[in-house]
Image (cartoon, grey):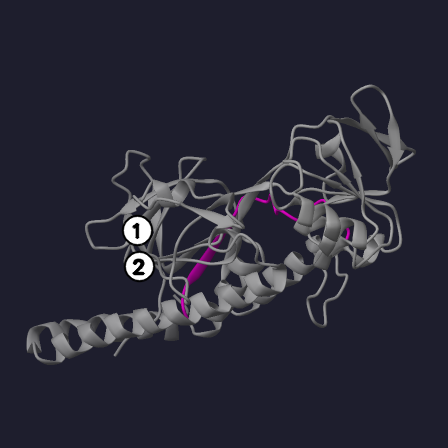
């Protein structure tokens, strides 16, 4: 008989406290991490979510293309998710995970920046990614508001407005043609990107997309709204939204501390960033470690990240069941171990009946 319980073990790390033990520790409290935690909590697993409190989409006004939650504020979506996880017995804490390592028992010890640590049988890492923006003055301050990268996330909100495309790589023409779906006023600023080829120029002309030479040196902002793009030499061209192509870098520090490496992802022959490779369930090459969301898929939207968390949570639960079943079979074939397990279960159940 297996009884779900939270245990405490002595901390031998030098911090002199106790480490709390969980079936699963989830690192990252975004859509992927909370969805994984919700799945695991509903499967009656002890689960802890450790969240740094820095969601990638915090600057955005709303989450889009998330069925039944269209336009919801990112903070509201996450707050609701945390409440749902807590409602099924999961735990959520704010903290910064600095490292993770294997324990002698085969689980994982997760160290936090405040010096505390927890132990888990399995890890789900949903730490997302970092958007590395082009170095243009004023760009970072407008990020997620009128400096954008995903038309499916933000295109509707800037429809029929003057949209600029900041070229920094060979995918800029593709990006300009894509954003043209939302507005007839699209301008491709070549900036540091390559010169389009003849066929590319033909496609741009056919879609009435203007092309502007010269490096972008800044943005013009009136009130609290982007109004123009300033070029080297001082010329300013009207613009109400700027589409860029950041480099996407997975937040993989905890994974590299376990020995996992990141992989570069290419699109159209251009490296767009780095991610952590995993199978369709999120399982990495390191046994016991799963990933979900943007840390594993650089182009995943919020709804896809949530789905990935559910898949990973279900896979982790299945993996734990397989391990628990192997132990149960071994105990059944070892009378002494079976008796000891029964005594532990009876003691735990007795404590619960007495409110301990």
Q: Residue furthest top?
A: 233
Q: Is residue 47 above or below residue 68?
A: above
Q: Quadrant of residue 198?
A: top right
Question: Is 103 left or right of 170, judged from the image as shown?
Answer: left
- Taking depth in this image into account, of 261 and 233 the one nearest to the observer is 233
Query: Which residue in the structure is indicated by mark 2?
Result: 288
Residue 85 pos. (x, y %): 55, 64
Residue 200 bears which disc, if any? none
N-terminal-most mark, 2 or 1: 1
- Taking depth in this image into account, of 203 and 54 the one nearest to the observer is 203
Query: Which residue in the structure is indicated by mark 1?
Result: 108
Question: Is 113 left or right of 343, judged from the image as shown?
Answer: right
Q: Which residues are magenta?
A: 45-61
Residue drawn 50% across and 65% down? Answer: 308
Asked whether the residues under the numbered discs 2 and 1 touch, taking CB atoms below 8 Å apart as contact, a structural biologist would say: yes
Residue drawn 35% across and 66% down? Answer: 5
Q: Please identify the dominant SS of the magenta region.
A: loop
Depth-wise, is mark 2 or mark 1 nearer the camera? 2
- Please say whether residue 297 is visible from this viewpoint: yes
Residue 350 pos. (x, y %): 31, 74
Number of callouts in the render?
2
Q: Secondary structure at mark 1?
A: strand
Residue drawn 59% across and 60% down? Answer: 82
Q: Residue furthest front?
A: 198
Residue drawn 54% across and 50% down? Answer: 268
Q: Is residue 19 above or below residue 221?
A: below
Label 2 – label 1 distance at C-alpha: 9 Å
């Amino acid at each position: 008989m297996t009884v779900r319980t939270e245990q405490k073990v002595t901390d031998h790390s030098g911090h002199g406290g106790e480490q709390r033990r969980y079936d699963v520790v989830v690192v990252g409290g975004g859509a992927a991490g909370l969805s994984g935690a919700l799945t695991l909590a509903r499967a009656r697993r002890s689960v802890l979510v450790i969240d740094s409190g820095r969601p990638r989409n915090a600057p955005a006004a709303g989450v889009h293309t998330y069925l039944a939650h269209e336009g919801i504020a990112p903070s509201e979506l996450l707050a609701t998710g945390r409440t749902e996880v807590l409602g099924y017995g999961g735990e959520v804490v704010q903290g910064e995970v600095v490292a993770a390592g294997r324990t002698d028992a085969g689980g994982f010890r997760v160290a936090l920046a405040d010096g505390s640590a927890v132990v888990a049988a399995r890890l789900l890492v949903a730490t997302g990614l970092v958007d590395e923006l082009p170095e243009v003055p004023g760009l970072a301050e407008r990020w997620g508001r009128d400096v954008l990268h995903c038309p499916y996330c933000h295109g509707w909100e800037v429809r029929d407005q003057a949209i600029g495309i900041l070229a920094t790589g060979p995918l800029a023409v593709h990006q300009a043609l894509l954003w043209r779906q939302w507005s007839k006023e699209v301008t491709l600023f070549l900036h540091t990107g390559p010169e389009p080829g003849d066929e590319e120029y033909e496609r741009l002309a056919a879609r009435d997309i203007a092309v502007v030479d010269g490096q972008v040196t800044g943005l013009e902002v009136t009130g609290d709204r982007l109004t123009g793009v300033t070029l080297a030499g001082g010329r300013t061209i009207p613009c109400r939204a700027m589409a860029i192509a950041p480099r996407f870098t997975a937040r993989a520090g905890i994974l590299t501390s376990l020995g996992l490496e990141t992989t570069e992802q290419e699109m159209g022959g251009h490296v767009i960033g780095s991610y952590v490779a995993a199978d369709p369930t999120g399982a990495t090459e390191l046994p016991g470690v799963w990933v979900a969301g943007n840390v594993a898929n650089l182009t995943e939207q919020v709804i896809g990240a949530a789905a990935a968390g559910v898949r990973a949570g279900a896979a982790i639960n299945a993996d734990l069941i397989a391990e628990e079943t192997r132990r149960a079979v071994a105990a059944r074939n070892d009378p002494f171990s079976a008796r000891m397990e029964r005594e532990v279960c009876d003691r735990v159940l007795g404590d619960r009946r007495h409110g301990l």
